[in-house]
């Protein structure tokens, strides 16, 4: 196998390209949502029920948000679109739902911690600080290693044990880096938009982006297992 076929950057980039259209749409919607929230009359008021639900329900609302956006919504595509359908789509949807829900709880706590550290301002410096901590600390040391275990496991149809063709894989270079590459491409623009919203809305609105990310993560996991970049 050629070295370039297992390049973590190529694997991560290929995973993003496989979902390029929904990703670009996601970026556009994220930007438009921020602008509409602050500059279009009536939009902020429309978000109030969602904001109130998160404030009153806390981690439960965060959990249910991710169950829907990380499990049920991408599950519709996994079941109906043959090109990305896994071998066991319904088991995959269930696993995605549980996995996403747990991350919803963790992210809710992390966003609250970020607000304590940096405040709730929407100025460029505050947004850059939160995004930097999110992507360079939270994602590098917690999210990416965890996803680098989960998504390849899902790509192996949730089988335990290491197949022979994976025994020589280096966890950081061959598994984590492709996931991190895909993560940065998708999430850096999105998180700048997410942190521009009030704290109770951040965990709710990030669910939309999470649906796309679960599809990207599945592609990255499958490619890291196979070692293919295309």
Image (tube, rainbow, N blue to C red):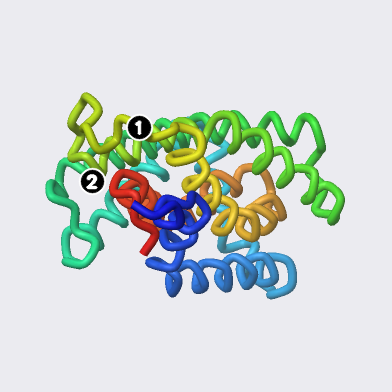
- Camera-nearest residue between 155 and 116: 155
Q: Residue at x 49, y 49 (%)?
A: 8
Q: Position of residue 177 (x, y in %)?
A: 52, 43
Q: Residue at x 68, y 39 (%)?
A: 136
Asked whether disc 1 touches disc 2, contact meaning CB atoms under 8 Å apart, the reply is no
Q: Residue at x 43, y 39 (%)?
A: 175
**Label 1: few (<14), some or many (≥20) within 10 Å?**
few
Q: Residue at x 39, y 55 (%)?
A: 2
- Camera-nearest residue between 86 and 70: 86
In the rendered structure, find residue 86 and report the number of the disc placed on it. Answer: none
Foreground tag (1 vs 2): 1
Compared with 108, 3 (above or below) is below
Left or right relative to 35: residue 161: left
Left or right relative to 172: residue 129: right
Q: Which residue in the protein does label 1 denote?
A: 168
Q: CA distance from mark 1 to mark 2?
A: 29 Å
Compared with 180, 108 (above or below) is above
- Camera-nearest residue between 6 and 18: 6
């Amino acid at each position: 196998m050629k070295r370039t076929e297992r390049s973590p950057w190529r694997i991560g980039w290929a995973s993003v390209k496989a979902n390029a259209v929904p990703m670009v749409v996601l970026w556009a919607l994220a930007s438009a949502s921020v602008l509409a929230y602050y500059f279009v009359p009536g939009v902020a008021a429309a978000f109030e029920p969602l904001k109130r639900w998160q404030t009153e329900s806390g981690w439960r609302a965060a959990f249910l948000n991710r169950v829907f956006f990380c499990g049920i919504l991408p599950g519709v595509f996994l079941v109906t679109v043959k090109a990305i359908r896994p071998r066991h789509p319904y088991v995959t949807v269930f696993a995605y739902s549980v996995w996403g829900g747990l991350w919803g709880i963790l992210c809710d706590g992390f966003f609250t911690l970020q607000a304590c550290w940096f405040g709730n301002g929407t100025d460029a410096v505050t947004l850059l600080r939160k995004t930097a901590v999110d992507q360079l600390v939270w994602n590098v040391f917690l999210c990416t290693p965890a996803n680098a275990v989960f998504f390849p496991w899902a790509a192996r149809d949730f089988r335990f044990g290491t197949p022979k063709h994976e025994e020589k894989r280096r966890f950081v270079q061959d598994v984590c880096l492709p996931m991190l590459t895909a993560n940065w491409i998708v999430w850096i623009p999105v998180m700048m938009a997410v942190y521009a919203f009030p704290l109770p809305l951040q965990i709710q609105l990030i669910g939309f982006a999470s649906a796309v990310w679960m599809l990207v993560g599945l592609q990255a996991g499958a490619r890291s297992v196979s070692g293919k970049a295309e």
